Amino acid sequence: MSEAKALSKLPSGSVYRHSLGIVGCGPRGLHCLERLANELAAIGSGEGYDIVLFEPSPWAGAGCVYDLRQPEYLRVNYAIKNIDVWSLREQPRPPSLVQWLLKVKKESVDAEEYLPRSVVGDYLQECLQIVQSELIALGCSIQLCSEQVDSIEVDAERLAVHAGERWYRFDDLVLTTGHEGWRGATRDGERRAASPAVVSHVFPVERMLSTSNIPCGSKVAVRGFSLCFIDAALALTQGRGGEFIRTPTGLRYRRSNFEPDAIYPYCRSGRPMRCKPQPQKMCLPASIRTVWEEGRTWLEGQKEQGGASFESLILPIVFDCAQRSLRLCGVEGSVEAWYGSWLEASADPWDVFDEMRKSCAIASGKAPVDAGWALGESWRQLYPAVASLAQRGGLETGQWKRFWRFHQEMERIAFGPPLENMEKLVALVGAGRVKLDALKSPEYEYEEDSAQFVSSKYEKRVDVLVDAVLPGFQDFSEGSLLGSLMAAKRARRDPVSGGVQVAEDGALIDARGQPDSRLVYFGRATEGWLLGNDSLGRNPREGISLWAEKMAAKVLESTKRMAR
């Protein structure tokens, strides 16, 4: 159906009412509503504002990622001290996650802890209820639609959304759809498609990794060796009745006999992730923070100097801060040399296992820090300033690929799993449940006669293949909402990074380079154009606050028209 015909079938609303649709109401949709409620409270009214939330999962505010029904061993990869829906508000304000746990759940927790996603989802859902009450008290109408949005059409006047059996018409539309529609074919997925023994993704683990898909005693190859793989490994072991027992030397795994016989992860690099340190367990000199503060200040001062060079500006300051941090901790060695050896390391199973154990020992304060810790911690501390320099085409011509390669490697070194999850993975390797024999990118071919996948390079035969690599920010499909908007020239990618381009307020930039302030996107697909798209963090670079200010200004203008 053409845009004009679709829109002509929609009922027109009151000329004075302002309508807003939010497609996807997980954490980012919640953050949009929180900022909007805050801005409407500042002008004293939301009269005449109609809001419709589209969220097909049963947990609006939490979304499918923080589903309240998922098992507790699936944890957030974000310290709970950083999870606060209300962090941008002035006091007094509703509680942060830590405060909420103490006040509502009567549970005292370590602020550095990493909680089950289901607990975080419970908090997010309650925050949405508070925001809804605030908006209603300000005079807004708010409706929740549990249907999946399958089409968006745009004309010069208004926007139309199709969900379920009807069209909805809006003045403004916000997309916060997460990984919606992104699952494309995996590498060599086409030649595997004929086999029923391919599990195309991990979540939800209860369904995708069930015994009907992965029988007890089977041999399983898993593509990916990062956070999603760890979730899959836990679902196939602890999720099937296995137990982790704390001993003086670490965790030990006791099997349940319902697990797969062996789990073989594989990835392109063959390198493991390093777990996040627990600062409260580490003895670090107080002066080390000065090093990172100086690094951030210096980088922030380069913002007005034109395009930034990754190789001659950003990378040297990252290495310098890391080297100074290491020296302050009384440890000898070269950070730059360590990074070079990290890139060149083989995927030898014992070396990888030792690296994982060492990472746990450092993170828990049981071993001295090393150059890898100094590099990872410095990157975490400097990252906001680095992101401000590099995003929105801020790098010099020809620097993006080098920057992004380093950025991806630092995901392993700086943003790995919580300590507890890495300890569990070490225990699974020690118990022989997870095997690192074929870690570096084996090629599996399906053998019809034996109904198995065969890797001749590693002489491995497995019964099931699981894809545990999440879609990248460039991987949304043509039929997705973003893909359709691109086809209609309502959105475009950055030609350098591949991220979807948005204006400062999140407005999608069309094929002509013009932003449409009515059509806004916040989410992972902007990665590369923006940096640091964590759904639980309040990232000012996304522009949600600026968008909310503009929405409140529109409401104020509508109110003035009504008063005339």
Image (spheres, rainbow, N blue to C red):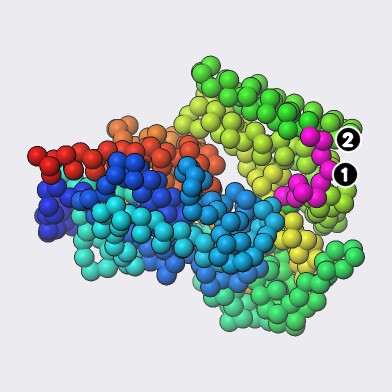
Question: Based on the displayed image, in which of its 4 quarters is residue 311 positioned?
Answer: top right
Identified at 64% across, 28% down, the residue is 296
The x, y position of residue 17, in whole percent, is: 17, 50
Q: Earlier in the sequence, mark 1 or mark 2?
A: 2
Q: Are marks 1 and 2 in contact (CB under 8 Å)?
A: yes
Depth order, front residue of 60/186: 60
Q: Classify the position of the C terminus by image quarter.
A: top left
Q: Going by the image, does 18 lie left or right of 219?
A: left
Identified at 12% across, 58% down, the residue is 11
Q: Going by the image, does 493 lie left or right of 332?
A: left
**Can residue 20 be seen?**
no
Identified at 44% across, 67% down, the residue is 59
Which residue bears the numbered disc 1? 368
**Can residue 325 be seen?**
yes
The x, y position of residue 265, in whole percent, is: 70, 62
| Secondary element at tag 1 | loop
**Span highlighted in magenta in the image:** 276-286
> Label 2: few (<14), some or many (≥20) within 10 Å?
some
Q: Classify the position of the N terminus by image quarter.
A: bottom left
Q: Is residue 535 positioned above or below 299 on the image?
A: below
Q: Is residue 83 positioned above or below 253 on the image?
A: above
Which residue bears the numbered disc 2? 331
Depth order, front residue of 86/61: 86
> Label 1: few (<14), some or many (≥20) within 10 Å?
some
The x, y position of residue 302, in whole percent, is: 57, 20
Residue type at the position of mark 2:
Val
